[in-house]
């Protein structure tokens, strides 16, 4: 008996692909913005939830309209509105990179259940790469859950995708 979870979900293949890529890109930019917070605060052992985004130099709270991925950086010409200190180009770079990689992963996976798993994986890798580059550490807060996540994904994904059928039943 094969009770696939995919059968219970709406047919994702009906969604036009360009729409999926645009959504993946915008979603990636937003996740990239969150990854910037993780990359900056996690190695400094600060909360990644509170307080809201501040200028690393003068501490001025960054308004929501100045927190739009990539676009805000261009609009304020890479400088804090309050103190005019130059803001690292890493911020828009991480946002643009995450958006790009999310589109590539969406293109590679298509509208399948593998997609959310792979997006979580690449997001974690992006955070690790940039934290490692600056601090030469890979925080346990990312790697330990990552190990658990990889094990769960490895066991469950073939079932979610239905690919275990061809691997096991073909031989009988
Ligand atoms: Zn400032």
Image: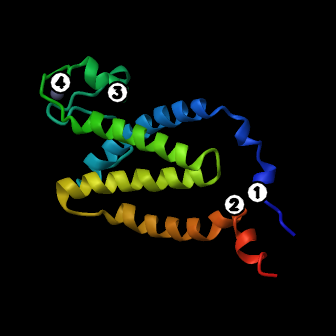
| Mark number, residue 160 | 2
Query: Residue 91 occupies which quadrant of the picture?
Result: top left
For the point 30% across and 63% down, the residue is 139
Query: Residue 14 occupies which quadrant of the picture?
Result: top right
Whether 153 is drawn above or below 22: the answer is: below
Whether 94 is drawn above or below 18: the answer is: below
Instruction: Give the Cα distance between marks 3 and 2.
Output: 36 Å
Ligand 1 closer than 8 Å to label 4 CB:
no
Secondary structure of the residue carrying numbered label 1: helix
Select label 3 or label 1 by which is in front. Answer: 1
Where is mark 3, residue-wise?
Answer: 67
Q: Residues within 10 Å of mark 2 (few under 14, many from 20)?
A: some
For the point 27% across and 28% down, the residue is 61
For the point 19% across and 62% down, the residue is 136
Q: Are marks 3 and 1 in contact (CB under 8 Å)?
A: no
Q: Which of the two discs, 3 and 4, labels the residue nearer the N terminus?
A: 3
Q: Which of the two discs, 4 and 1, labels the residue nearer the N terminus?
A: 1
């Amino acid at each position: 008996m094969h009770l696939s979870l995919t059968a219970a979900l709406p047919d994702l293949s009906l969604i036009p692909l360009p729409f999926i890529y645009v959504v993946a890109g915008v979603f990636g930019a937003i996740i990239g913005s969150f990854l910037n917070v993780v990359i900056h605060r996690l190695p400094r052992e600060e909360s990644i939830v509170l307080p809201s985004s501040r200028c690393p130099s003068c501490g001025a709270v960054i308004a929501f309209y100045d927190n739009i991925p990539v676009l805000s950086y261009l609009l304020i010409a890479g400088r804090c509105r309050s103190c005019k200190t130059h803001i690292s180009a890493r911020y828009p770079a991480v946002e643009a990179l995450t958006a790009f990689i999310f589109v590539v992963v969406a293109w590679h996976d298509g509208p399948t259940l593998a997609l959310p798993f792979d997006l979580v994986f690449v997001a974690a890798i992006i955070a690790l790469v940039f934290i490692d580059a600056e601090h030469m550490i890979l925080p346990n807060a990312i790697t330990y859950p990552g190990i658990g996540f990889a094990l769960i994904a490895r066991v469950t994904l073939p079932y979610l995708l239905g690919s275990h059928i061809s691997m096991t039943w073909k031989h009988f």
